[in-house]
Image (cartoon, helix red, strand yellow):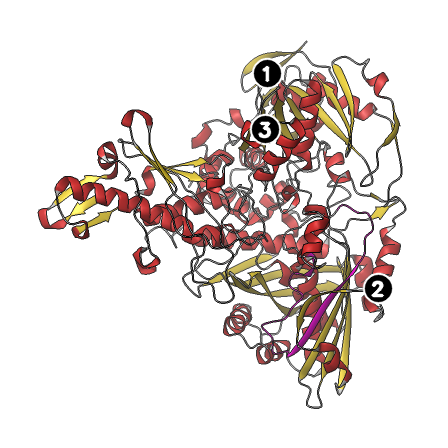
Amino acid sequence: MTTLTINGRKHDVSAAPDTALLWVLREHLGLTGSKYGCGIAACGACTVHVDGQAMRSCALPISGLVGKAITTIEGLPGGDTHPLTKAWVAKQAPQCGYCQSGQIMQAAALLAAKPKPTRDEIIQHMDGNICRCGSYPQIISAIERASKGA
Amino acid sequence: MTTASKTPFTPSRRAVLAGGVGLTLAFAFQADDGQAQTATPAAGRLNAYVTITPDGTITIMAPAPEMGQATNTTLPLILAEELDADWSRVKIVTAPIADAFNHPVFRSQFVVASLTTRAYWMPIRTAGAQARRVLLDAVAARWNVPVAELTTEPSVVVHAASNRRIGYGDVAAFATAPATLPEIKPTDLKPVAAFRLIGKDVARWDVPGKSTGKATYAIDQRIPGMVYGVMARAPVMGATARSHNGDDLKKRPGVTHVLPLTGGIAIVAERVEQALAARAALKVEWKTAAGSTYDSRKGLEAFQAAARNPASTAVVGRKTGEAEDALKTAAKVVSGEYSTDYVAHAQMEPLNALASVTADSVEIWVGTQWPTRVRDDAAKIAGVTPDKVKVTMLPMGGGFGRRAHTEYANEAVEVSKAVGKPVKLLNTREDDMANSHVRPMTAHRIDVGLDASGKVTGWKHRIAADLVVPNLYGMARLEAQKGVDHIVMAHADVPYYDIPHHLADHVYQDMGVRTAAWRGIGAGPNAFAVEAMIDELARNAGQDPLAFRLALLKDARAKAVVQAAADMAEWSRKRDGAALGIAFSRLGVPQLGESMSAVVAETAIDAASGRITVRKLWCAADVGLPIQPRNIVQQVQGSLIWGLSSTLKEQASFRNGAIEQSNYTDYPVMRMSEMPAIEVKILRSGDIPMPVGELGLGAVTPAISNAVAALTGKRLRNAPFTAVRVKAALA
């Protein structure tokens, strides 16, 4: 049994210690906002926060996460009223939408560390997150919008 | 494309919701809108449901699978326009799988070829107008006034003469649909100038869910009692397992089944991590199959030789006049050769489905472009009739043509049937890639005949490529089409250019590779070849490629998009260290009308590294009538990025019949930092919405090749334009 702290709640998880956090979130706990894309931390669809840092949950064994604060898209403060969520809707960023939870979590870590990033800083920070539909321009403008508090 | 005979406009059936709490209308329609420019449009049937409850909520069914193209907003929006609904009171519900919701052309719930909005356009408008008319007739009877005196405002019926108003919800509370629903003629529809929803940027209904992690994809679906399956993919199409260590795997905790299937081996376990760990521990020796010796590097050379060889056996795919004769009598023949490598879809959501098979029913949750086929195949596998199969259409985490194939849903049904429990059947990214259904590799040889004055008299385009139609639709379909693989041959014709004699043919290259429709289908390879060839003709003639194109184009819309893209890019302005290339491409089928696009690429090149940098793309897009302009811009932008990714980065290869790439690390796709600036301009050219979802894609590769030619005088002929190839071309 592994005890994980996810979105402020403690969960006792019965899974092998080397199980990736992503599968525990999705299939044990029903937190399906974090997506499986590549399994090797190469696409960013599974991005969550661990102690405030954006991390790829597909490549994080749960054994290393005891005592850490894990935040998923479901635990993003403010939910629908979070500035990034509002900006994503305002810019109509998603197309197929599958990568967008990971994009938002990656962006949230950026804005927490640097509330007014430049465009180049946004691109550098977001470059590990793939969007196959090509919604990149809308993602950039949504992050810019959120950073302006609009 | 399935063609259908015309069916007359007939109301099919009606229903009043149980308890009289509201009004439900169901319709059948003639799909032929009589507005197609040429030939006889294929026709089909559509039933669209509109439910209005007394509280004024208007529920509209979204009939088409959603993969990011926004048709699940677009189609209800079009219906709401004709219904004169208050959009803020509209609730969109994903339709079930039923004939009533069939695509009017394909006669199946099936999303391909960017033909959803175009095909549903008149039927779904008519559905909305008919629902409105039923409401008007009910009010006219109750108020005892001529129906002609009634008008509507959003969700309100108005009788101006007596200054009375009544909301749609209040009408629905007493209205009953008549035995025979009113006939709606095209002239009864709202004038395009009166549209208040169409042409505006209405927010997509699926965006909030997709911006909060709440949207449910098939991979997110969970039901009680469900177990997990993971597919281990046969590396070569048709290869089955000679031996495997399944008995050992079944000793692992939770692992219950190891099931050889047609496409590989399914491992079933109680928990997902148990299934994934067992997949990692699986050892298989695969038998060989037809494609087991295939090496695509050697294949490319063979394809090129086949395209070049006049004696190759080829199937005529597109023909106007007598190109062979024109070439024989030409004063001069100019030739060009091009190729494109295999590319994979690499959609973000690996293929998966959840199926629950019982003794007499099947339920499937799946993201698919072809839910009707999923239903019908599931019925056969489970041994039930299709009405016992319930398919829940969930949004796709990327389709791009890959999810027009449905083998992953069938496998989930097979496994659930074998296990006797609901099974969520997953593919790891590596197994998804191992099972890539690629766009064919293509080699092209184009010979163009010119007369003494330099005028183009004949054009022959020979394409050596794998086939797609047999893999997607079966060999019978290919035979019915007289061997013409329309997916491979798309965009190989040149109808908008003044070229009197044209021939495009296909030398089959059946390498045993799994192939699929891939966004843009033939336009990716063929528009590259055609538009690079046009550029070569211009350069041979010593003419500006823009002026040459404008002179050779005979179609006013085509000229307009080319001129518009050139204007956007300030074509005549010289760039520092970069150059511009221009290309034209189109999308659609002639019977239903085509959209048109032109792309200009500002491109720089680093000769030492062989690295191409596309600084900016401009695209002018003539989409007929734009329904949701912002979404159209985003779809075209997505097409351009998709095209760019295949031009600069994507390259799938086969060795011993197996694809060599396994993940985004060795199959890199476009990332944010690699994006050029992109500018899309929509041109409106009529009152019918033309295809959008793949528009612009075909013009990207040639625009970049043409820009590099302008910059260096050297021609990039083999896509993708990798550093190795660029350096070789410049040498």
Residue underneath mark 2: B306
Outermost residue toward the left in this view: B162
**In the image, which disc is placed on residue B365?**
none
User: Which residue type does callout 1 highlight?
Assistant: Thr
| Chain bearing mark 3 | B
| Chain bearing mark 1 | A
Q: Residue at x 69, y 83 (%)?
A: B542
**Secondary structure type for disc 1:** strand
Q: Nearer the viewer, residue A12 or B256?
A: B256
User: Which residue type does callout 2 highlight?
Assistant: Ala
Residue underneath mark 3: B364
User: Are circles 1 and 2 on residues that touch, CB within 8 Å?
Assistant: no
Residue B278 in the image: state x and y as whole percent: 79, 21
Q: Are marks 1 and 3 on the same chain?
A: no
The relative height of residue B62 versus residue B570 in the rendered view (above or below) is above
Residue B559 in the image: state x and y as whole percent: 53, 74
In which quadrant of the rendered view does residue B686 lie? bottom left
Q: Which residues are magenta?
A: B488-514
**In the image, which disc is placed on residue A5?**
1
Residue B468 in the image: state x and y as whole percent: 71, 51
Task: Characterize the local packing of mark 1: few (<14), some (14-19) or many (20 or more) Cα atoms within 10 angstroms.
Answer: some
Q: Main secondary structure of the magenta part?
A: loop
The relative height of residue B81 versus residue B684 in the rendered view (above or below) is above
Label whose residue precedes the other's in the sequence (2 or 3):
2
Q: Is residue B611 visible?
A: yes
